[in-house]
Every structure is written in structure tokens, then in C-alpha cells.
Image (cartoon, rainbow, N blue to C red):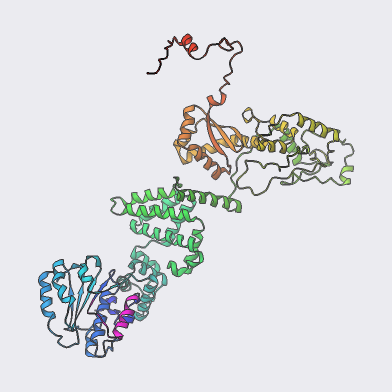
Amino acid sequence: MALALYRTYRPSRLSEVIGQEHVTEPLARALSRDSVHHAFLFSGPRGCGKTSTARILARSLICEQGPTPDPCGECTFCLALAPNGPGLVDVIELDAASHGGVDDTRELRERAAFVPAQARFKVYIIDEAHMVTKDGFNALLKLIEEPPDHLKFIFATTEVDKVIPTIRSRTFNYAFRLVSSRQLQENLAQICRSEGVPFEPGALSLIARASGGSVRDAQSIMGQLIAGAGASGLEQAAVGDQLGVTDDALLDQVVEAIAEQDGAALFAAVNVVSESGHDVRRFVTDLLHQVRDLILISHAHEAANSDVLDVSPDRREVLATQAGQFGVAELTRISQVVNQGLTQIKGSTSPRLQLEILAARLLLSPSGQDPETLLARLETVERKLSAVSSGALPTPTAPGPARSAPAQASEGRAGKPTAGEAPPPARGDEGLAPVPPPDSVRSSSPETPAPTTPPPTAARPAPPPAPGGNKPPRPPKLASMGSQQPPAPPPPASYSQPDPRLGEQSPAPQADDRAQEQQREANTPQDTSDPASAGRQESSPPDADAASSSQLPPETGGAGSGDAEELQRLIAIWPDVIAKVRANSRVAAAAWESSLPHALADGALTIRVASPGQAVSIRSSRRDLAMHTLLIQEFGIAVEVNAVAVDEVNRPEDTPSHDDPDLGDGGLSGVDLAMRELGATKIGEFDGG
């Protein structure tokens, strides 16, 4: 019968103990100088080499050439204390779980007084030392403090805090650690070569991860897998199935669904986990491990190589691509949500229900006012905007504002130019001076007379700015968030916009026209106390303002033409906006029922609702902020949102009538008015006292 791998490949020298150099190297130097203490305390997790190191230390002390860090392996004592040797009478191994009482300690103390039968020292190796009772330790205290020269004690424990302080203070303490995954994989690969078993590197990675850093656990797991492996040896897929490790493809599906906020894909993965019999806790643990890898890549970038992540180079590239879909704050929030879900799944009577709740929480947008949550929301918006600007995502589209019949007719004519007509200017070039058509085109239609006056659709040049008003024209406050093109500059003063019905350029306005425009501008009262309003008045010509204001609905008031057009666009797409709100929350959709954009000015959108109570409810529940975020994320519109009731919008100004008898010098007010109208009684004042 073959021995277990952890027994077959147990180390026989200090140099063969893997992952514990901080313990083996000091012990080797002490053995070389023959300055070995009489009592040691080895502590650390299970399977990391405590008992093996204790046996090697005893062997190094008793070797005929010892004390030495490298036993000869040929003398009687080395052969007896070999990893699979018969043992030696002078090296006593005790299990404190069955020998931890006071009586066992007294018996040990009586036997320790006798000299060794064969070797130079008598060595006691007490495993699981934390199981020794307090009285048992107290019975050993004097012997450990002042032992005879031939006596050595080595205690090994996984719970060093349960060893009483009086024992710890009389021993040399060495803390063992868990072994890294990379070292475990190297050790397992060496064993596979010695056994002649073919393997895939990914299979060894899964075994190392399943062992949790314990060498004995890793070798035991691999022994089980080798025993049931076929001619192809250890394959990653077969090892993953036997160990219950989540497939990388399933984890990738979950991460992609979280990045794209795809609820259908995420819950489909949850259904696969439940229906295939996966351990829910193991699945969530593997998901948390993958999120940890993404966080390392986001922070360390190239420094988080495949060795640090304990993955193959190809897998590292996949993780790097996934990390680029998140921000650091988003990944931190996701890790917190997954970690909380893992805590709730432990001990739960319905793991699938807890997993579905975890999936729902992962799909929720971050809420709250703490800095981490706000940063996560900002990263989400920035990622979507950058994706739109780079072309990775389509720009949000919506129906444009309603256009007048003359404009549509003009567009129809411009779409089919006839002989003698110049083609319309290219998009984005509206602000440039038109190029006159060639003479051949002009001569081909001599019957077309030149207009004596500019057509109504021709834009007039901007008037010169008022003295002291040297500010540049303000850009439109409302624009598509995904647009990268700056607004077109106004045409030069010496040119005018072309008439789409003609092939020639319309004549420029004469000097008397400019004088009349300047005169109208001078007669218009302006409030110079507000620099912003002054800038707006300077940036738009009077004729353009008059033309645009004639097309605005009554609610726009004095808003600019850009705001008016954007308001018409909002009114046109408002059903789509409410549909998006309803898709996110039916309660929120009920709050915005019967609402409609009312006014837009200075980047602030006023939305008209049915009642004052509805407006108060929207403001108190912060649904106006949610609407602000929705307009940015889904429609690329950045405006402040204010909800106003219909009564507040249409409330007439409280102006008293000219024939009100209570007005004027003889009118009633204050106490007299209350006495006449309400029948109040005037009470005299009392002097203080």
C-alpha cells in the first residue's frame, strides 16, 4: 500500500522545509554554533511544518556528527529518525490532547530525570500543546525552567494564545506561516515529476488555492486527485469539477453583467450556480477573490503581474480588460457588497435566496452621500461619457423640437437643389462664409432675378459690441453631453448667410441698416448691474432675438433661442424620460405623473406638476436630483431640475384694484381692519410692573 504524499515527501533537513526560511535559517545557525536552547515553542496554522521541523531539529541534535544543520543520514540515529523511520526511544512524541492532564505531566517529569538510553539528548516533542491543562503546565513549569543538561522540549501548537504565559516566557518562540501559492505550486510540480504524473499548471493553481496555504493539505488533495486521474493526468477542468471551484467563464459572466448592469445575464449566472449544485459560499468566495484581483490591477497596474495574482499570463490579460470597465471606488464598493453577502450566506437556511439578494444589490446604483459612494457614482458617469465620446456606445438620441412649416419647406428645397441653386453648406460649416457659385452656374439661369432685400431666413451679421463690453459671446448653457464640436463662430461682418433658393450670395446690410440696428439697441433699456445678462444681450443681435422669441411658447419668457429649442426638445422626449423613470421605479414614475417641462433658463429646468403636494413630495424625496442624474446618463442633458405646481405657475399677481376702499391715506390697516372685518376687540396695553 502506497504512503500518502505528505508522508512520502516529508522533509528530512531544515533546508527542505518550504516557506519557513524565517524559522529554519536561525535554527541552522544556532545548530552550527552549538547554542541550542533547551525549550522551543513552534506555533502556526495547520500543515505548515511545525511537527516536521521539530523532528528535524531532534535529528540534527542527536546525529553522530551533530549538533549540525545537515544530518548525515547514515548513522543509526539519522536512520531511526528519518521521515519514515522506526523512531528512537530517546525521542518521545506526545499528543497533548490525550496526555495533557496533571497525572500525565507528573509521569513525564519522573521519566525525564533519567538519562538517555542511546543518544546524546532526550527530546520531548509535545504536539497540540495548547491542550495541556493549566495545572499540567504548572506541573511542568519547574522542569522546563531548570531542566537537566540532557533534556530538550519542543512544543507545537496551532493556538499559541492558549499556552500560559509562564511557559511562553521560558521557551524560544518561532511562528510558522502559511505558504504562498507560488511555492506550493512549485512543490506540487516537483512531486508530479517524481511520480511521473502529467499535469496542467492551471490544475496545480486550483489545488494550491484549495489548500489555503497548507503544505500538508495541498499534498493530500493532490494525492486524492492523482489516485483518480486518468492517463492524461491532472487536467484543470477535471480538477475544478472535483474541488467544486467556480469556472472562470462563469465568474467572467458575472463581472461583465455587473459592469453592464445586465440583470438578465447576472440572474442567469445565479441560476446556473444553483441548478448545477455549486456550493454557494464557494462561488461567492471565488467571486470575491476575482474582485480582489481587479482591485490589485486597478491600483498596481503592470506591477500586478501574473505571479502576484497567481494566474496565467492569458488570464491576467482578461482580468486587466475587466478592470478597465470599473473605477477604483466602484470595485471597492462591489467588494464590500460581496463580502457582506458572504457573511450573510454563512449559516443561512436558504443560500440561493441570499445569493439572489446579493445579485440584486450588485445591480443597484450606489446611493448615499459618503465620499466613497459619491466617487463611485462619478466614476460611473465618467465611464459612460467617455464610452459615448469614443464611439464605444451610441450617442443618446431623441426626437428633435417641432419645426415650423417654412423651415421644413426650406429644408425640402435645400435637399433637392435645382439648376442655378448652390448646394447647402456642409454640417458644422454654417458659420463660414459661403463660396459663390461659378459663373457658368449663374449664367445658366438668367431668368432668376436677384432679390432686392434679404430673405427672411437670411441671418444678419452681429452688431458691434457696446463700449466696454468686450466679453466673448457666452456658449449655450445646454448641449449634448457627448458632443465634442465647439459652437460655430458667427459669420464676418462683410458677409451674410446665403439664400438656399438662390445661387448667389445675398448682399450685405448697408450702412443705414447698421445705424438703425445700433439706434434700436441704444433705445433698449439694459440692466448693466448684471454682467451675465449684459453678456447675453451683447452676444445676440436684436433681429435674431425678435425672430426667436416669436417662436417660443409662453412659458419660455425671455430665454435665449438655444434654451427655447432645448425646451422644445425636452417636451418632445418627455414621454421617453418618464418611461425610463418607470423602468427604474414605479413609485418614482407615480411621483412625476402628469408632469411636463415648463421653462428653461440659465441651465435650470422647471417641470410643471399637478399639485403643490406633488411638488413638495418630489423635493423632499430628492427625486429632482434623481431626474437630474437620469437626464445626464440617459439623454446627455445637464440641467438643474425644479418641480413647480400648476397653481404656482399660473398664480396671478396679487395687485390691488384701483378702487379698493382700504387703500390710500384713509384706508384701514392693522388693528382697525381686524376690528371691522373680524369683529376683534382691542385690548389696552398694561404698563410694566
107 sits to left or right of 455: left
- Was residue 30 drawn as part of the magenta stretch in this picture? yes
Q: Is residue 277 visible?
A: no
Q: Compared with residue 514, is residue 322 higher up or lower down, i.e. above or below?
A: below
Residue furthest to the front in view is: 689
**Residue shown at 49% from the left, 27% from the top:** 612
In depth, the one of 65 and 351 nearer the eye is 65
313 sits to left or right of 659: left
Where residue 436 sits: x, y (%)?
84, 45
Where residue 433 sits: x, y (%)?
79, 45
**Residue shown at 56% from the left, 26% from the top:** 649
Give the quarter of the figure containing the N terminus: bottom left
Q: Compared with residue 609, is residue 364 higher up or lower down, i.e. above or below?
A: below
In depth, the one of 601 and 687 nearer the eye is 687
**Residue shown at 76% from the left, 40% from the top:** 414
- Magenta part of the chain: 22-39
Give the quarter of the figure containing the C terminus: top left
Where residue 517 sits: x, y (%)?
79, 32
Where residue 560 sits: x, y (%)?
67, 35
In depth, the one of 382 and 501 nearer the eye is 382
- Was residue 32 drawn as part of the magenta stretch in this picture? yes
Q: Quadrant of residue 155?
A: bottom left
205 sits to left or right of 446: left
28 sits to left or right of 404: left
Q: Is residue 64 visible?
A: yes
Q: Quadrant of residue 199?
A: bottom left
Q: Compared with residue 668, is residue 71 higher up or lower down, i.e. above or below?
A: below
Label the magenta part by its dominant secondary structure: helix
In depth, the one of 465 and 507 nearer the eye is 465
Q: Quadrant of residue 245?
A: bottom left
Circle count? 0
